[in-house]
Image: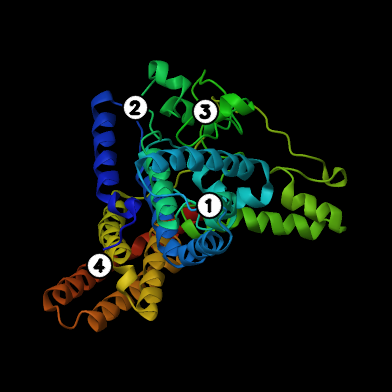
Amino acid sequence: MNPNPIVLSIPIFFILIGVELLVERFRHQKLYRLNDAITNISCGIGEQVTGVFMKLFVVAIYQFCYENYAFFQIPTNWLTGIILFVAVDFFYYWFHRYSHEINLFWGGHVVHHQSEEYNLSVALRQGWLQKVFSFAFYLPLAFIGFDTLLFVTVSSFVTLYQFWIHTKAIHKLGWLEYILNTPSHHRVHHGVNPKYIDKNHGGTFIIWDRMFGTFQEEEEEPIYGITKPLNSWNPVWANLQHFVDMLTLLKQVPNWKDKLKVLFMPPGWRPDYLGGRMAVSEVDRTLYKKYDTPVPHKLNYYVFFQYLFTVAGAAVFLFKAEQMPMAMKAISAILIVAAIVNCGALFELRKWVYVAEFARISCTVAFIWIVTNNYPAVLVVAIGLFLVSSIWLIKLRNLFFQPSMVQNRELA
C-alpha cells in the first residue's frame, strides 16, 4: 500500500466534496459545474499519476543532499515534526509567492488557478510540472538535517491542510483569521480582481503574508480564474498552454537579455517594443461570462459513468504503483491520462474523440485482460464495461457527426 498521506486521503476528499454538494443543494447555491469539476479532478489525477515517476527524482535529490551535506542529524520525534511543519510552510510561502512572480514558475502553478469556480474540487487541480520548480525551495531543510521520510510526510500534511480552504461554504472564522490561512483568505488568492492578484500565498499560516507584505483581506466577492482564461476542458492543454504562450513570446524577442526576462520577470511582462507589460484591468461583473460548453444530459451521463471507473482505476494505480513493474506502471499511466483527456474532449464535442474513445476502451480492456488473467471476476467487469460503453457510444454518434452539433461546437 502507498503510505503517502495524500493518496490515503482520497476517499476523504470525495466524501467532503459530497458534503459540499449537499450544502449547495440546501443553500440553493451554484457551486459546481460537472465539466469544470471533472476537469479539476482530472488535473489532480494527472498530477498524482505523473508524480509517481517524478517523485523518485525529487525525493532522490533531497535524500542525496541529506546524506552527504547535512550540517546536523536532527532526531525524528513529535517536537521536530512540529518545527519541520512550520519550516515547510515557511518555504512553501516563498515557493508559492515566486510561482506567481516568476513567469517560468507560473507555468507550473497556473493550472491550480484556471478554474472559474471555487469549490473543493479546485483543491485537487494541480500542475503536473509544479514539482520541477518547487523541490529546490525545500533543499535547505535537507542541509539543516531533517530526515527525508519525515520531510515527505510533513510536506504531505501541509498540502492536506490546504484542501478544506477551497470552499465558499465557510465564511470568516474569527480570531483564527489572524494566524491561519482560511477559506476567506484563500478565496482572495484565487481572485482575478486587480487588488487580489498575487496576495495571500501562505499554505497553513497567513502570518507569512502579514509579515512580508502580501496580505489582502477579503472584501467584495472575488471573480475566480486567470487573466487569460484557459477555455478548455483538456487537462494536458491546461498544463501546456502557458509554456506554449511563453515559447511564442520568446520567438518574438530578438536578444538574450529580453529572452531571460520573459522567463524570469513576472507573468505578463513584455519588452517595450512589444507593448510593455500587460495591464490587469477590473472585471466587469455584468459582462463577465464563464467558459462553458453545454452538451445534452445523455452525454454528461456517459462521461460521469466513464469517470467513475477512471477514478477507481487511478486509485488502484496509486495504491499499487510501488509494486508494479515499470512497463505496467507506464502503460497504466498512459491509459489513465488518455481517459481524462477523452473526458474533456467529450465535453467539447471534439469529433476525433469519438474514435479515440473506442480505441481507449479497447486498449483498457485488453490491458486488464493481460494483467488480470488470474482474476476472472475483474475480467468479466472489464468486458461488461466495454460492451456497455460501446453500445452507449453508438447511440451518441449523432452528437459528434450531426451538422448542427458540429456547427455549435465550432462556434464555441
Q: Amino acid at mark 1?
A: Phe
Residue 359 in the image: x percent, y percent? 36, 75
Give the labeled residue for mark 4: 389
Give the labeled residue for mark 1: 72
- Between disc 1 and disc 4, the foreground one is 1
Disc number for residue 188:
3
Residue at 36%, 33% (x, y): give it.
Answer: 31
Q: CA distance from mark 1 to mark 4?
A: 58 Å
Residue 87 appearing in the image: yes
Q: Residues within 10 Å of mark 2 (few under 14, many from 20)?
A: some
Name, please, the residue furthest toward the left: 377
Quadrant occupied by the N terminus: bottom left
Q: Residues within 10 Å of mark 3 (few under 14, many from 20)?
A: many
Q: Amino acid at mark 4?
A: Ser
Q: Are marks 3 and 1 in contact (CB under 8 Å)?
A: no
Give the labeled residue for mark 2: 169
Q: Amino acid at mark 3?
A: Val
Q: CA distance from mark 2 to mark 1?
A: 45 Å
Q: Are marks 4 and 3 in contact (CB under 8 Å)?
A: no
User: Along the polypeptide, which appears first: circle 3 or circle 1?
Assistant: 1
Residue 244 in the image: x percent, y percent? 65, 58
User: Along the polypeptide, which appears first: circle 2 or circle 4?
Assistant: 2
Q: CA distance from mark 4 to mark 3?
A: 42 Å
- Between disc 3 and disc 1, the foreground one is 1
Q: CA distance from mark 3 to mark 1?
A: 39 Å
Q: Residues within 10 Å of mark 1 (few under 14, many from 20)?
A: few
Identify the secondary structure beneath mark 1: loop
Residue 5 in the image: x percent, y percent? 33, 51
Q: CA distance from mark 2 to mark 4?
A: 36 Å
